[in-house]
Amino acid sequence: MFRKALLLGIVTAIFSSLGAILYGNFYNTNLFDFSMVIGPVAIVAVCVIISVFAAFGFWLSEKVFKSWGEFVFNLLFCLGTMGSILSPINFQFPPAMLEQVHSINGVDTEMFFPIYSIPMHFFPVLVWMTFKPLFYRKR
């Protein structure tokens, strides 16, 4: 059971990382470049960590809550994801970086950072819920 959850976590890590990198590159190329704030390596690392924790959390919730395990896991994963968006909303740029961020195209771009980072917070949970039926089929 844990191997299947871990495999789903790895697939989630790969596809959420890929989606986040593509989204980040599109945003950085076409709108404002925030790659100096959070680069591709950090994005992949966060996706991998979240996905591995999700795999362990799913396995544990299935073990502890039995028939309610999937619901409990999905509820906690969604609440955790929604709660995580408070981080970019409250993010304060370090003074050294603030001048770089403000100088992009002469526009005050600091307020665009949450628009850049919030969608990426939802990639792991969306990928998990998309691929889960392939690993755990209803009988």
Image (cartoon, rainbow, N blue to C red):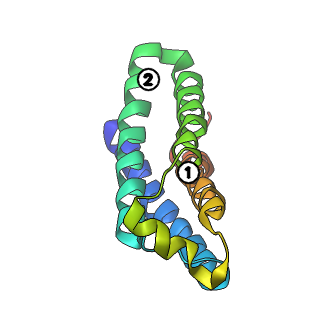
Q: Amino acid at mark 1?
A: His
Task: Give the residue drawn at x 57%, y 54%.
Answer: 127
Task: Give the residue drawn at x 53%, y 40%.
Answer: 84
Q: Amino acid at mark 2?
A: Ser
Q: Nearer the viewer, residue 58 or 133?
A: 58
Q: Residues within 10 Å of mark 1 (few under 14, many from 20)?
A: many
Q: Position of residue 9 (x, y in %)?
A: 41, 49
Is residue 96 positioned above or below 55 on the image?
below
**Residue at mark 2:** 61
Q: Is residue 90 left or right of residue 105?
A: left
**Residue at mark 1:** 121
Q: Quadrant of the C terminus?
A: top right
Distance Cα–Cα, label 1 vs label 2? 22 Å
Task: Give the residue drawn at x 35%, y 49%.
Answer: 49
Helix, strand or loop at mark 1? helix
Helix, strand or loop at mark 2? helix
Q: Where, by quadrant of the figure, is residue 117 drawn? A: bottom right
If you read the primary sequence from the N terminus, does the residue marked by circle 1 or circle 2 appear first? 2
Q: Nearer the viewer, residue 127 or 120?
A: 120
Is residue 69 positioned above or below 108 on the image?
above
Q: Is residue 119 left or right of residue 64?
A: right
